[in-house]
Amino acid sequence: MATGDQVVSQQVVDQDEDEEESFFQDIDILQNHGINVADIKKLKQSGICTIKGVQMTTRRKMCNIKGISEAKMEKIKEAASKICGGSAFVTALEYSDKRKQVFKVSTGSEELNKLLGGGIESMAITEVFGEFRTGKTQLSHTLCVTSQLPGANGYGGGKVVFIDTENTFRPDRLREIADRFNVDQTAVLDNVLYARAYTSEHQYELLDFVAAKFYEEPGVFKMLIVDSIMALFRVDFSGRGELADRQQKLAQLLSRLQKIAEEYNVACFVTNQMTADPGAAMSFQADPKKPIGGHILAHASTVRVMLRKGRGETRIAKVYDSPDLPENEATFAISGGGITDAKE
């Protein structure tokens, strides 16, 4: 009997999802178009759980899934495009309505929120880069807590996924930040799903698990944090000989991140390291450092923010690149309770 109730409640959830987010369509709908359950299961195991997910997967990649032949793949693709109504184009007005689903997550600092147009945006990749000790990991930890709090414009809060590549995640730090916002420490820690990635391949594989988790609990997760995005690529690929391969793998990872952010309407926050630029001395740049990851990462990130040290505990954030934010700066501080406004 319980399973029947679960099915009913799941249908209600799905209906709510359809009303709320027309972009979230369950891959099980393919059954109505003659695709068998076994094939749908194979797609789910590969991290393709929605109709949009089918559209986001190339034909070649789908054929690489064990048990999916070229004929099956064509049938699946055809069914998915039928469900989506055939035309891939919408008017700017219709897309504007769809963009109303986008929410912003507070950073903990009003000044930083103002700089980012309200906070960390969903359905986008926000990249923060800077030298060591500029507050990247502290910002990541603060977002683990602020993502769970109700915010502006009807944002209700939600769970967080944290992928750690540098072994810098500290649960006790979340306890301190939870105290600042007067929320239960145990509940805050229970709502953060943590994974430690050891290689760049492992990092990519974890995203399949993340996609499956977001699908199982639709609308529950609101934030995906990767701290840091490039650390493992720096280790796994060395020298110019492996650079092309590294950038290709990085492009695939970032493409997967962007697709997950759009598919499930979550905010994606990544941190990045910096490197000294040997050629900068020739062009007389004031700051001869630049973020790593090259053009691939630069183009994949929707919003890029540069952090640098200020006096004492203060840090300065500057919008480096964004489709809709002006180039500007804001000052914030790192306190015992995470990221906060700097005292004048």
Image: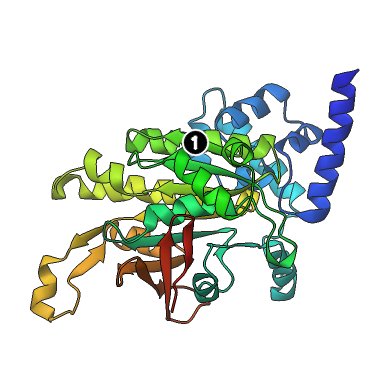
Residue at point 71% right, 46% down? 219
Secondary structure type for disc 1: strand
Residue at point 15% right, 46% down? 241
Residue at point 57% right, 49% down? 179
Q: Which residue is mark 1?
A: 194
Residue at the left extreme? 282
User: In the rendered image of this protein, does residue 160 appear above or below residue 105?
Assistant: above
| 116 and 93: which is toward the camera | 116
In the displayed structure, does residue 47 sit left or right of residue 254?
right
Quarter of the image that includes the C terminus = bottom left
Count residues near mark 1 (Cα–Cα under 10 Å), then give few for <14, some for 14-19, many for 20+.
some
Where is residue 20? Give x, y as percent: 79, 55
Q: How is the image coloured?
A: rainbow
Where is residue 231? Give x, y as percent: 29, 46
| 3 and 240: which is toward the camera | 3
Using the rendered view, name the quadrant where residue 307 is placed. Answer: bottom left
Residue 58 in view in this figure: no
Q: Amino acid at mark 1?
A: Tyr
Quarter of the image that includes the N terminus = top right
Using the rendered view, name the quadrant where residue 119 is placed. Answer: bottom right
Residue 190 in view in this figure: yes
Where is residue 226? Give x, y as percent: 43, 47
Where is residue 330? Give x, y as percent: 43, 76
Using the rendered view, name the quadrant where residue 284 is placed. Answer: bottom left
In the displayed structure, does residue 273 sit left or right of residue 265?
left
Residue at point 53% right, 62% down? 107
